[in-house]
Image: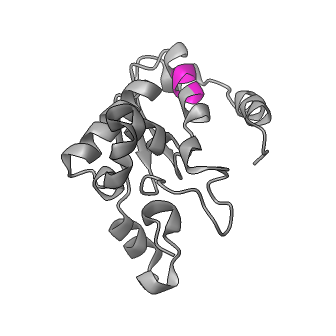
Amino acid sequence: MPTSQKERNRIAKMKQIPVNELIHGKELMFIDDSIVRGTQLRETVDFLYESGAKAVHMRSACPPIMYGCRFLNFSRATGDMELLTRNIIVELEGQEGLNHIDEYSDGSTERGQKMRQAICQKLHLASLEFQTLEGLQKAIGLEPCKLCTYCWNGKE
């Protein structure tokens, strides 16, 4: 993944070739490994609507990324406030909201639902859900002590 946003946007645009019969008039489910900043995702969602999609739903294979990766540069964020989730939390509650990251991570809480709704509005999605950390751990099949979860829960 290129380090500059301009270069990432250019490469993402080059990958977009619509197949009209698979998009036009359809409700689509977009599945991605994670949502970091959301910039490429919004462009992709807009592209799908421009190509005639009736609705675009999103499912992320990862829990919401709440912390920039310190170890493998997984999230490619230079600071936590580059993350879409952090920006949404601050938009919803100001800096005070950052004291409730665990609630925002959990889609069953009021804060978690509000964050998902706000992301839907910002990215023009009909719906959004994230994998849970427990679900991710179960899918991978490793004991939690053998899996780095820093990006999702801030635990080293």
- Tell me: 53 left or right of 75: left
Q: Nearer the viewer, residue 25 or 125?
A: 125
Task: Identify the residue at horizontal 41%, vertical 17% (top origin).
Answer: 25
Q: Is residue 76 above or below residue 126?
A: below
Rendered image quadrant of residue 3: top right
Q: Residue at x 40, y 28 (%)?
A: 125
Colour mode of the rendering: one colour
Residue in the foreground of this view, choosing between 139 and 80: 80
Position of residue 4 measured from the top left corner of the image (x, y, whole percent): 78, 39
Residue 47 visible (yes or no): yes
Point out the stretch of residues depicted in magenta.
Answer: 43-48
- Whole-percent x, y for residue 54 in the image: 39, 19
- Left or right for 53, reference 79: left
Please name whichever residue, 34 or 24, is drawn nearer the observer in this view of the structure.
34
* Magenta-drawn stretch contains 46: yes
Q: Is residue 60 magenta?
A: no
Identify the residue shown where x is 47% and y is 38%: 87
